[in-house]
Amino acid sequence: MKLFVNFLTVFRIMAAFFIIPTIMFNHYWLTFILYVLGATSDWFDGFLARKYNCTTKFGAVTDSISDKIFVCLTLVLLSIMTPVWFIIIPVLIMIAREFYVSGLREFAGLQKIEIHAQNRFAMGKIKTFAQMLATAAFFLMFAVGASVTPNTTSRFVFFLIYALPQTGVFCLWFAMVASIWSAAQYTHTFLRKMKKVK
């Protein structure tokens, strides 16, 4: 089971990079499938590790790294594919948040302060879920849009083409707000523990 959990973590990194050629060659359905599999593995490996108590040092280190690679890389790809301000602004803020929190936790470690990852219902988890939902919505929009032909008459298809970007933008901005909130929570925890150390 430990090997399978670690495989899911590594698969998330591989999926992030495999998504690049699928976009380059306009295989958007494959893009969407790889993204969903990668996003699902993020939840699944954590669930299995907790349920079967099969955490490893390798998994503890690479899980956080794979999450950041998967999220940041796909967000960058999304902003390249849709270079408009209401996509780029939240993407930049959320990527900056990832670097800020990582740096804060590393600095805290140098001060012998432990800042544990927030629980599953904390704003950081909500942020991640909203990010993944937003990106999945956009990738699905690209896939559906690429499948449309002049003879397409399905109302459901046209509804998806209209609804998916609206959903994606809403979730992206919601994720941005949650991202800022989460960073503030980490900062507050750090400052509170710094006072105790002093």
Image (cartoon, grey):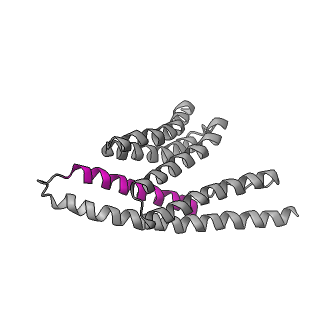
* Main secondary structure type of the part rendered in magenta: helix
- State the image coordinates of residue 46 (x, y, percent, origin top left): 54, 45
Q: Work out whether 108 lies above or below 175.
A: above
- State the image coordinates of residue 104 (x, y, percent, origin top left): 71, 57
- State the image coordinates of residue 142 (x, y, percent, origin top left): 31, 53
- State the image coordinates of residue 79 (x, y, percent, origin top left): 45, 57
Quarter of the picture holding the C terminus: bottom right
Q: Residue farthest to the top?
A: 3
Q: Is any atom of residue 121 visible in this view?
A: no
Q: Along the line of sight, which residue is nearer the eye, 92 or 164? A: 92
The reply, left or right, for residue 85 in relation to residue 58 is left
Q: Is any atom of residue 134 visible in this view?
A: yes
What residue is drawn where x is 47% and y is 62%? Answer: 88
What residue is drawn where x is 65% and y is 41%? Answer: 61
Q: Work out whether 178 lies above or below 20.
A: below
Q: Work out whether 108 lies above or below 38.
A: below
Start and end of the magenta stretch?
Answer: 122-148
Total labels: the figure holds 0
Q: Residue farthest to the right?
A: 198
Residue 101 is one of the magenta-drawn residues: no
